[in-house]
């Protein structure tokens, strides 16, 4: 006869029954975040920087601006994945909170880039699912290396993103004030993310890792410009 007694949270049987839920819930959450980041329209908590329709662009300038904003959008998809992967693997609650806050701000960036791409009559990268999957796996690895290494990975990622955004500001048409305002606001947030990661205890990454990150980023940006 089956007992209807309420199990104590301290009992071994209770823990045994609850274990699958503790393992499954984070996986379901990770899948939900992945689907939202790649396929669902992003929703920003802050308004899109700049004034829409502030300048008429030539066809060549429109295509170039759209390609750069597609790179930025793909970069934000990858950033979401990195932070989600690192937060999934993080052991310390404070580190997880820092990563999740940064991911939320990156969601703003994602929405801003989506808005600007639509205004320019263009689309996101067709390879966004690939960028997300690869970056999530990389975030998992970084998260498993420990809190200081994971935070150092955040700081180095944001430092390299800052460099990319600087190059975009130098390349965007001067008359495209809307795209420039978006990129400048993104750049400010990325700098803050890196500074917070270092202040929380992030340690510098080895030179070979930094070089590998630059190479992987170059592949993504070079491909997303066109696809």
Image (cartoon, rainbow, N blue to C red):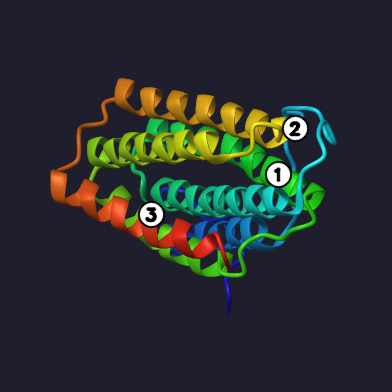
Q: Residues within 10 Å of mark 3 (few under 14, many from 20)?
A: some
The residue lying furthest to the bottom in this view is 1
153 relative to 26 in the view: left or right? left
Q: Which residue is mark 3?
A: 217
**Cα–Cα gap, marks 2 and 3:** 25 Å
Q: Position of residue 126 (x, y in %)?
A: 62, 69
Helix, strand or loop at mark 2: loop
Q: Position of residue 57 (x, y in %)?
A: 77, 43
Q: Which badge, 2 or 3, comes first in the chain's sequence?
A: 2
Q: Is residue 84 visible?
A: yes
Q: Against 131, is 139 above or below?
A: above
Quadrant of the snapshot with the N terminus: bottom right
Q: Residues within 10 Å of mark 1 (few under 14, many from 20)?
A: many
Q: What count of labels does the image hold?
A: 3
Mark linked to residue 27 = none
Q: Which badge, 3 or 1, comes first in the chain's sequence?
A: 1
| Viewer-closest of 152 and 147 | 152
Helix, strand or loop at mark 3: helix
């Amino acid at each position: 006869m089956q007992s209807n007694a309420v199990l104590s949270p301290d009992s071994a049987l209770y823990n045994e029954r609850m274990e699958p839920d503790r393992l499954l819930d984070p996986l379901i959450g990770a899948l939900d975040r992945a689907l939202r980041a790649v396929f669902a329209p992003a929703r920003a908590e802050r308004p899109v920087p700049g004034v829409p329709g502030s300048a008429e662009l030539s066809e060549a300038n429109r295509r170039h601006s759209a390609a750069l904003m597609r790179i930025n959008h793909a970069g934000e998809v990858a950033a979401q994945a990195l932070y989600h992967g690192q937060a999934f693997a993080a052991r310390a609650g404070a580190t997880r909170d820092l990563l999740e806050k940064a991911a939320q701000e990156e969601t703003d960036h994602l929405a801003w880039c989506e808005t600007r791409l639509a205004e320019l009559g263009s689309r996101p990268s067709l390879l966004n699912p690939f960028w997300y999957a690869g970056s999530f796996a990389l975030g998992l690895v970084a998260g498993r290396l420990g809190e200081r290494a994971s935070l150092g990975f955040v700081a180095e990622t944001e430092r390299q993103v800052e460099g990319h955004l600087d190059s975009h500001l130098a390349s965007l048409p001067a008359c495209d004030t809307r795209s420039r305002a978006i990129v400048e606001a993104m750049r400010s947030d990325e700098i803050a993310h890196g500074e917070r990661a270092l202040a929380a205890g992030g340690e510098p990454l080895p030179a070979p890792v930094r070089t590998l990150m630059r190479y992987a980023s170059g592949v993504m940006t070079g491909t997303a410009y066109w696809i």
